[in-house]
Image (spheres, rainbow, N blue to C red):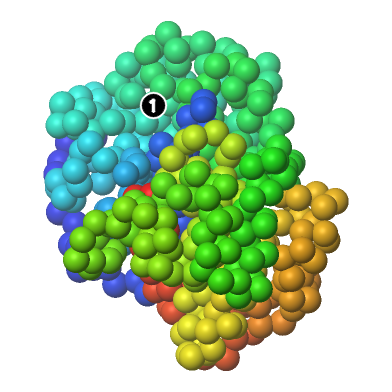
Amino acid sequence: MREPKMTNIDPARAGDAANVYLGRQPIIDRNGSLVGYELLYRSSSRNAALVADDTEATSHVIATMLGEFGMGTVLGADIGYINVNRDILFSDLLSVLPPRLFVLEILESVELDEALLARCKELRSLGFRLAFDDVSINSVEALAYLQHVDVAKIDFFRCSKTDLPKVLAMVKRAGCIALAEKVETLEAYNLARSLGFDLFQGYFFSRPEVLSSRRLLTDRVPLLNLLGLLGRDAGVQQIESEIKRIPKLIVQLLRFANSGAYSLARPVTSLREATLAVGIRQISRWTQLLLYANSDDNPIRTDPLIQMIGMRARFMELTTEFLYPGEDDFADQAFMTGVFSMAESMFGSANIDVMRELRIPPVIAAAIGPERQGKLGALLACAEAVERSEAEGIEAACERMPGMEPEDAGRISLAALRWITQYSLSV
């Protein structure tokens, strides 16, 4: 048995690594609402040696990313899941984290001895929630000590369909929340849900077969009509008339116009005032994002797809402003490219008609094609690599964009994250 010891970790050393990209893999509940993120960080291939082990990697997460950019920016109103090894569990670095905002994922490589279990009890008494990571039928120790944690993350890749119900039953008997991780297909999600899992983790919601379930519905038609008007530089009165057909957008406009984003002398109470205060460009942004919203009334901040699409589009817009300052029209095209990069999955065979109706330029259609053509295609490829925290993909995309370096991608991605977080909390 290892003796317990508190580890002193130097935050300055933890923050030395450059070119680290923020990845947030969403965690959703049974209603499809976003409830948290696993925070994932990758250093560039040129700097991989600077984050040499789990201790330094997690230290970098806590000391640099969360400390420098703020937990509110990274998490919004949600919960963060962070991987921890034995050294981190016994580290005083955890004292900088608000316990209510984090779930500590105990890596499967951690030895579960008496000292560690005692530390788990102490951390839970402080308000932290704990999770066992990568649980499978072969996780003998983890399954034996489920009473010491709050969440069991069950690995869908490592558990057969036969073993899944057995593992789930043990988790439920221990009173733990069952989280299905590495769920990458609609089939896997449906299986996990039917078995009774509580939470689900993965990018499966952005897969084509999942997006097809959000195909063009009746309530999307006013949005498409509004986008058509915005693209034709219609007058404010005509735009206002179309907005009146979209109650969700009206509520958002009024909320945002009266938020701290605008320093207005008095409250905004009319749609006309809200339209003028927020501006046509911002309305266009919201309308594009709402195309991906669920048809129910869940808040936008809990819709994982909108969070991802919004961050992608804003990343592309900000990158354009960085590389091509003053080219506002091209920045608008970049944002639209990000939004409509999943249009084919969203609208299916109607995609061509939608593109034509919205007068989307051929250059955008080429960018979202499989070859990711042109400047917009390079921007999209970079945004997708950032989402996946793929250092090599980011570097390859940057090579297609003179003046863009991997560290710029990391900085811009965090600015995009701030934007989508502010947007989500404002509406």
What is the crowding at mark 1: few (fewer than 14 residues within 10 Å), some, or many (at least 20)? many
Q: Residue at x 50, y 78 (%)?
A: 319
Q: Quadrant of the N terminus?
A: top left
Q: Is residue 97 visible?
A: yes
Query: Hey, which residue is sitting farthest front in the picture?
Result: 237
Residue sitting at x 40%, y 40% = 36
Amino acid type, callout 1: Val
Residue at figure coordinates x 33%, y 28% from the top left:
112
Q: Is residue 100 above or below residue 193?
A: below
- Residue 343 in the image, given as x and y percentages of width and height: 71, 56
Left or right: where 340 falls relative to 179: right
How many labels, in total?
A: 1
Left or right of 46? Residue 116 is left
Expressed as whole percent of the image width and height from the top left, the position of residue 387 reads 54, 60
> Which image quadrant for residue 327?
bottom right
In which quadrant of the rendered view does residue 8 lie?
A: bottom left
For this rendering, which residue is in front, 317 or 387? Answer: 317
Q: Position of residue 424 (x, y in %)?
A: 40, 51
Report if residue 3 is visible in the image: no
Residue 385 x/y as whole percent: 58, 65
205 or 57: nearer the eye? 205
Image point (43%, 26%), residue name: 152
Looking at the image, residue 162 lies above or below residue 392: above
Q: Toward the viewer: 182 or 147?
A: 182
Q: Which residue is mark 1?
A: 151
Q: Nearer the viewer, residue 393 or 78?
A: 78
Secondary structure beneath label 1? strand
